[in-house]
Each structure stands twice: as C-alpha cells, then as structure tokens.
C-alpha cells in the first residue's frame, strides 16, 4: 500500500471527527516520502513540518493521546458512546496501517499535533490536528 493510500485510509477513519480542546479541529492526513529506519526525532518532526527548531516538542504514545476519547465511561450518554466507538476505530486504523507510531505535540497553547508512523514501505504517514490549551 502506498503512502497516499495509507493517508487516505487514515483520513477516512478520521472523517467527521474533531479533536476536542478549547477549540475543535479536524484531522488532516500527512505523508512524507522519506525512508525512516530509526524512530523519528523531535527535531526531524520540526524540520518536516517547517517549525523553528526551538519550538518545544512533547512525544506521547498514541493510546495516551486518545485516552479521554477512546475509552467509554459509565457516565457517557448514547452520543458520547458512539463517539468513543469512532475514536476507537480511528486508533485501530492508525495501528493497523502504521508501525512505530508516536504523537508529537509541537508548541505550547496553540499546539500542532502530528500522529506519525511508518508505512509498510518504510516512509512516514499519519494525521495532523491542532489543540488549544491555555
């Protein structure tokens, strides 16, 4: 499967979902034709996304990143339970289509998020979104 095909699958899994924070942003697909043998470093993600090299980057696990969205709680109403299922399918799609997945939180307050892993061909693909945390 090509990078573009993986990106399209991830975009489809994220279709209609918004990343909740102080503002809600959609998920966009990202892919780079860069063969990556070692895990991606914070400086590489800054370079690939045209950020200044002095911008802070926090790296978190994909399950940790989606912990509040993909886990059903007893107090959830029916709509929230449906949303949890959609986020669970998104996480499953990410894990099924990418290896070595990491979430890179770039910046502070207005945070660019890149959920990136390796495709079968060894290139990089994933999703991006934004968070606002004041």
Image: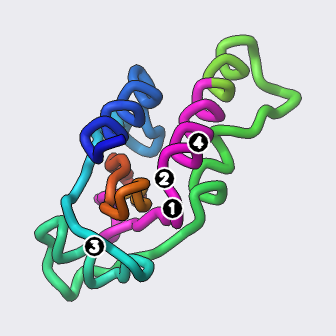
* Cα distance in 3D space between marks 3 and 1: 13 Å
Q: Earlier in the sequence, mark 2 or mark 3?
A: 3
Are the two marked residues, 2 and 3, in contact with CB atoms closer than 8 angstroms?
no
| Residue at (18, 69) in percent of width and height | 48
* Cα distance in 3D space between marks 2 and 3: 16 Å
* Cα distance in 3D space between marks 1 and 4: 10 Å
Which residue matches tag 1? 101
Identify the residue at the far right of this view.
Answer: 74
Identify the residue at the far top of this view.
Answer: 78
Which residue matches tag 2? 98
Give the percent coordinates (x, y) of residue 95. 58, 48
Left or right placement of residue 16 versus residue 93 in this view: left
Give the percent coordinates (x, y) of residue 25. 33, 37
Task: Choose mark 1 or mark 2, whichever is in front.
Answer: 2
Left or right placement of residue 123 versus residue 19 in this view: left
Which residue matches tag 3? 45
Judge the density around disc 4: few (<14), some (14-19), many (≥20) Cα neighbours within 10 Å: some
Judge the density around disc 1: few (<14), some (14-19), many (≥20) Cα neighbours within 10 Å: many
Give the percent coordinates (x, y) of residue 117. 43, 60
Which residue matches tag 4? 91
* Cα distance in 3D space between marks 1 and 2: 6 Å
Judge the density around disc 2: few (<14), some (14-19), many (≥20) Cα neighbours within 10 Å: many
Task: Choose mark 2 or mark 3, whichever is in front.
Answer: 2
The quadrant of the picture occupied by the C terminus is: bottom left
* Cα distance in 3D space between marks 4 and 2: 11 Å
Dot 2: what SS? loop
């Amino acid at each position: 499967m090509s990078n573009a095909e993986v990106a399209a699958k991830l975009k489809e899994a994220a279709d209609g979902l918004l990343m909740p924070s102080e503002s809600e942003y959609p998920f966009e697909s990202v892919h780079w034709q860069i063969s990556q043998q070692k895990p991606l470093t914070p400086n590489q993600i800054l370079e690939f996304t045209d950020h200044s090299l002095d911008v802070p980057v926090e790296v978190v696990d994909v399950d940790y990143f989606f912990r509040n969205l993909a886990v059903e709680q007893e107090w959830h109403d029916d709509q929230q339970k449906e949303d949890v299922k959609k986020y669970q399918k998104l996480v499953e799609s990410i894990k099924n289509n990418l290896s070595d997945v990491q979430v890179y939180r770039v910046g502070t307050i207005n945070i660019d998020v890149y959920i990136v892993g390796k495709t079968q061909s060894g290139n990089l693909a994933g999703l991006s979104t934004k968070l606002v945390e004041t």
